[in-house]
Image (cartoon, rainbow, N blue to C red):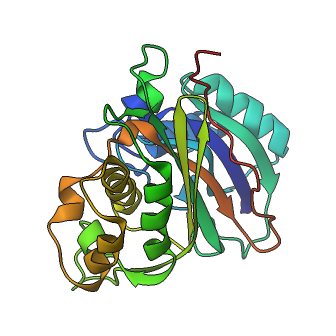
């Protein structure tokens, strides 16, 4: 049995998330079916670095594959891409150490969220258009409350009785690029809907409906507000999964440019 590390990108609009589900089209389901066809066997094990929700995209999702094969990594990549729909693409396939695990070996994940400050016909599937004027300084002030180890039970639909709702947020970076506001959130791991609710809270702070200094209180006690502010999945991208030795991304780049210039 050989183990491979797979890096892939996908446009998540048509999918019910990453994880295989009954009676739903998912990215993992499409990839698993393509791999079974390539190898001519159903004895294919595929594990992702983590789930992405319905409609969420990925610039560099990581998975590991266990299969008996003599095919070279590049041949696996090309043959599998031939079987995949155009909105899923394998970027790289590498031989991996048997101890490598896409999820357990990861040290951190990075998500990118794109907010558009204007209505757009071209980028609709990749942004969240916020009609109100956003104060980026206020958003950055609000973001400071998220850094470090916090209990995000108000920001997730995960049951705190079944799993820990604590997560370490390494950094939150907010920059403007043309008509876009880009938000990068780097953390140890992410709970269900956590990033989208963090972005929703940041947008509320930017709109002036939530004072930045009040964000801290949302982390100290249970609050119904973050679920009400959940940002749509369209603007969210799993940007990078970091493993030991990986260098963190420095510059913040948009997936597409929305500008009048």
**Residue 123: x %, y % from top left:** 48, 22
Residue 37 visible (yes or no): yes
Q: Is residue 111 above or below residue 158?
A: above
Residue 158 visible (yes or no): no
- Would you identify the image quadrant in which residue 109 lies? bottom right
- Would you identify the image quadrant in which residue 188 lies? bottom right
| Residue placed most toward the observer, 203 or 193 | 203
Residue under the point 73% across and 56% down? 4
- Quadrant showing the C terminus: top right
In the picture as drawn, the residue positioned furthest to the left comes out as 224
Q: Is residue 153 above or below residue 20?
A: below
Instruction: Answer with left or right where residue 13 lies relative to residue 41.
Output: left
**Residue 257: x %, y % from top left:** 62, 25
Q: Is residue 146 above or below residue 181?
A: below
| Residue placed most toward the observer, 222 or 176 | 176
| Residue placed most toward the observer, 232 or 147 | 147
- Quadrant showing the N terminus: bottom right
**Residue 59: x %, y % from top left:** 62, 42
**Residue 178: x %, y % from top left:** 60, 29
Residue under the point 30% across and 64% down? 211
């Amino acid at each position: 049995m050989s183990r491979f590390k797979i890096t892939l990108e996908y446009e998540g609009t048509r999918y019910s998330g990453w994880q295989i589900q009954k009676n739903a089209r998912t990215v993992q389901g499409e990839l698993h079916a393509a791999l079974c066809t390539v190898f001519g066997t159903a004895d294919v094990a595929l594990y992702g670095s983590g789930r992405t929700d319905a409609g969420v995209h990925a610039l560099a999702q990581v998975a590991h594959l266990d299969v008996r094969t003599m095919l070279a990594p590049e041949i696996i990549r090309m043959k599998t891409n031939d079987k995949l729909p155009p909105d899923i693409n394998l970027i790289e396939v590498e031989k991996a150490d048997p101890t490598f695990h896409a999820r357990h070996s990861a040290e951190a994940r990075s998500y990118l969220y794109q907010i558009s400050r204007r209505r757009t016909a071209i980028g609709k599937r990749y942004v969240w258009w916020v009609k109100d004027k956003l104060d980026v300084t206020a958003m950055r002030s609000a973001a400071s409350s998220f850094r470090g180890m916090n209990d995000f039970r108000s920001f997730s639909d995960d049951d705190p009785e079944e799993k820990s709702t604590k997560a370490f947020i390494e950094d939150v970076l907010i920059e403007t690029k043309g008509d876009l506001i880009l938000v990068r959130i780097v953390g140890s791991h992410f709970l269900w809907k956590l990033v989208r609710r963090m972005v929703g809270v940041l947008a509320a702070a930017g709109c002036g409906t939530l004072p930045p200094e009040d964000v801290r209180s949302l982390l100290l006690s249970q609050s119904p507000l973050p679920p009400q502010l959940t940002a749509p999945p369209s603007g969210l991208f799993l940007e990078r999964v970091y493993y030991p030795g990986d260098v963190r991304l420095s510059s913040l780049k948009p997936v597409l440019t929305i500008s009048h210039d």
